Amino acid sequence: MPNGDYHPECFKCARCRRPIESPRHGHEYEGRLLCEKDYQRYLEKDSTRSDRPSRSRAAVCAGCDGPIQGETPVYALGQAWHEHHLMCYHCKKPIHQSEGHVEKNGRIYCPKDFNDLFMPKCRACGLPVEKEAVCAQDGKLQGKWHAACFGCHTCKKPFPDKSFYVFGDAPYCRRHYHKLNNSLCKSCDQPIEGPCAQTVEGWRFHPGCFSCVECKEPLTDTYYNFENQAYCERDIMVIQRTRNVRAERRKTFFGKV
């Protein structure tokens, strides 16, 4: 398992220059990042040095201290192993080389346990994120997602233009963010981003949408509330006179959302 961070386009083998699929398939050897195949080649070359078993002698298994004969040694942690003696530190099961292994802090893990223990988990599905992770570069949103899982927390739809809104440390599409933020215009039901007229009741309008429900004339700093609707002074007077009711005069607040 390589240490440090890499750009996705830089995460490739220093020897064959081929991209490495995920962190568990990469290894660092003498300061260089290698794929699994080239890493094993270098370890096999090391075994011919004076401090390793020579080609004329059988390699010694680090798991049982017995000679490795009649099979190809598996190399991990700079040592040779019988394949059936190379076991995951966490689950204690033998690791088949067809699935590979991961080394971390002097210990050997099977890919599944390494992912479960150390890889970040997708906030949407809860499974490990090995590649194509999505996160907020500005730090306003914590955690990571699979690219296929990243979408609005409410409607689950993806963000085709890669832009989204954050509310309560979760990503949202434009409409559902404004719905949670109480910034949908009460009149046109569209998001308000900028100047806003707000009433005592907590209603919000685009300034151009804030009008008398009866005559549609724009309302400014005052309005009258009758049956949860905003009226101008002229129309509310007619209603009060014909229905023998009273409506309270209220003040409008103007600001920005």
Image (cartoon, rainbow, N blue to C red):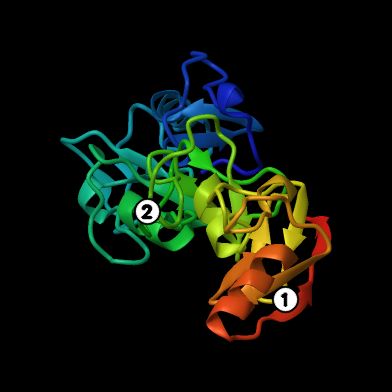
Most foreground residue, 159 or 204: 204
Specify the amino acid type for callout 2: Ala
Q: Which residue is drawn at 46% across and 29% down?
A: 39
Name the front one of labels 1 and 2: 1
Q: Is residue 213 above or below residue 70?
A: below
Q: Residue at x 62, y 79 (%)?
A: 240
Q: What is the tally of numbered marks visible in this picture?
A: 2
* Residue 150: image location, x then y, percent: 45, 45
Specify the amino acid type for callout 1: Val
Q: In this view, does 130 lie above or below 197?
A: above
Most foreground residue, 147 or 47: 147
Structural distance between the alpha carbons of marks 1 and 2:
76 Å
The numbered mark at residue 200 is 1
- In which quadrant of the rendered image does the C terminus lie? bottom right
Image side of residue 111 versus residue 245, left or right: left
The numbered mark at residue 93 is none
Residue 101 visible to an observer of this rendering: yes
* Residue 115: image location, x then y, percent: 40, 54
Q: How crowded is mark 1: few (under 14 residues within 10 Å), some or many (20 or more)?
A: few
* Residue 32: image location, x then y, percent: 62, 28
Q: In this view, does 227 lie above or below 61?
A: below
Seen from this angle, which residue lies furthest left? 70
Q: Earlier in the sequence, mark 1 or mark 2?
A: 2
Which image quarter: residue 72? top left
Most foreground residue, 120 or 81: 120
* Residue 122: image location, x then y, percent: 44, 54
Residue bearing mark 2: 62
Residue 232 visible to an observer of this rendering: no
Q: Residues within 10 Å of mark 2 (few under 14, many from 20)?
A: some
Q: Residue at x 44, y 32 (%)?
A: 47
